[in-house]
Image (cartoon, grey):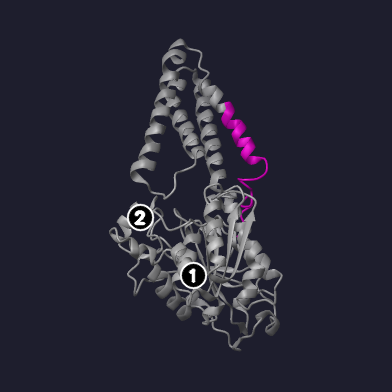
Amino acid sequence: MTWPFASLSLIDGPLPWVALGAGAAGAVWLVGGRRRWFRRIAMPTALAAATALTAGAAMVIEEWWKPFPDPLPPRIHFWAGIVIAALILLIPRAMAADRKGQLVTGCAVLAVLLAAVTQMNLVYAPYPTLGAVFGYVGSPRVTLAELPAPTRGTVEGEPLEEAWRPEGELPHQGAVAVATVAGTTSGFAGRDARIFLPPAYFADPQPVLPVLVLLHGQPGAPEDWLVSGRLADTMDSFAAAHHGLAPVIVMPDATGGALANPLCMDSALGNAAGYLTRDLPAWITAHLRVNPDHRAWAIAGASYGGTCALQLATTAPEVYPTFLDFSGQAEPTLGDRARTVAKAFHGNDSAFRSVNPADQLGTRRYSDSAGVFVVGASDDRYRPDQEALCAKAVGSIASVDCHLVSGGHDWRVWSTALARQMPWLTHRLGLTSG
């Protein structure tokens, strides 16, 4: 079912500006009470309290809790402070108004909250559309166990696009399945994976399709590429131009929790690497009708997921000989090298270096591997990391490309990066002729 306003953009067009204007008007109302006690006592006290609470929360998050490896952008803290100020002002501003003014005060607070949330959403763009706010993807859902096997067999070939043509009408869209991938050997407890099946997966005879493992960031979840990255739109567009063909895309849990950070390694923090290089491939070949030859497999990801993709491409190239690193870090991190090594490897720096991509690229040669680095041109935090890693990779990996796209460290960059790299990726995986 199509939602009538699901495609309404929350990051482009007039809506962010309308929300900002409404929020500004609401803020003017909230600080504009005319009663003397409000102007001299309540309003200054509320703003001072909001400033103190915002600063205190920022200190707790950035210095003590540290749920993220990198500091939050100042814009996030600023708009969080605006939200706190609006909530504190609600009661005294309502007390300083008549009955009609109290209703306006409530609306003003809501307008400020909407403006703040909209502006914070622009930082990373996790909700590009109204539908994304509610987790709307648009693709039909299927259950893997209910999908019948092709009665007329399968078709192989390289490039597959020249060896296979659909017989009969294909679905106009791909479909999404949800599946549990157990950490049988690793012991890693992952959330349910998401799988995107292109239209050609439902053909009979069925083409033997390549595999793309696509990783989310931190914080993040397996569905992020579908909800925030507009994956279904990208893949449906690609499939429409290639007779319904596209890779089967598996989106596993790369962290084990929204705020968890196991560094995509086997360490004291969990066996995330073992899960992604042993349990996941075994599950894919057992439950999906795909090409079992890992030369037709790739791994990709954004931010933490990009770091993870490069990690597994350098530590397990026999599993993932093709990778795409979108805005990844210089190295897996909990904030700094000392903290990372202490928590993950009990202070054993050599153990960390043995699985750190930057160290691996300096000592190993990957003659059968290929990869792409993509980063936003205005991503001041991660662009230097990507440029340094790409320079190292050029001397170690057989085929490497490095690209800049317009934007910063957000889902607009990553969804654009995936769409632009699909021709290269599908040619590399033997799907298209280039």
> Is residue 183 depicted above or below 157 in this figure?
above
> Where residue 316 sits in the image (x, y, percent)?
45, 73
Q: Which residue is mark 2?
A: 340
For the N terminus, the quadrant is bottom right
Query: Dividing the picture into quarters, in which one does residue 230 lie?
Result: bottom right
Q: Residue at x 35, y 39 (%)?
A: 60
- Few, some or many residues within 10 Å of mark 2 (<14, 14–19, 20+): some
Does the magenta portion include 336?
Answer: no
Q: Earlier in the sequence, mark 2 or mark 1?
A: 1
Residue 10 sits inside the magenta stretch:
yes
Label at residue 29:
none
Rendered location of residue 246, percent (x, y): 62, 72
- Mark 2: which amino acid? Thr
| Residue identified by numbered label 1 | 313
Question: Label 2's element?
Answer: helix
Q: Nearer the viewer, residue 33 or 405?
A: 405
Q: Name the quadrant of the C terminus.
A: bottom right
**Farthest bottom residue in view:** 152
Q: In the image, which residues are magenta?
A: 1-25
Sort mark 1 into few (<14), some (14-19) or many (20+) by Cα contacts within 10 Å: many
Q: Amino acid at mark 1?
A: Ala
Which is more toward the observer, 8 or 13? Answer: 13
Q: Disc 1 on helix, strand or loop?
A: helix
> Whole-percent x and y of residue 8?
64, 48
Q: Is residue 142 shown left or right of residue 253? A: right
Name which residue lies at 47% across and 29% down. 86
- Residue 151 locus on image (x, y percent): 58, 88
330 or 286, which is in the foreground? Answer: 330
Using the rendered image of the protein, determine whether residue 138 is visible from the camera's viewpoint: no
Residue drawn at x 40%, y 68% is 273
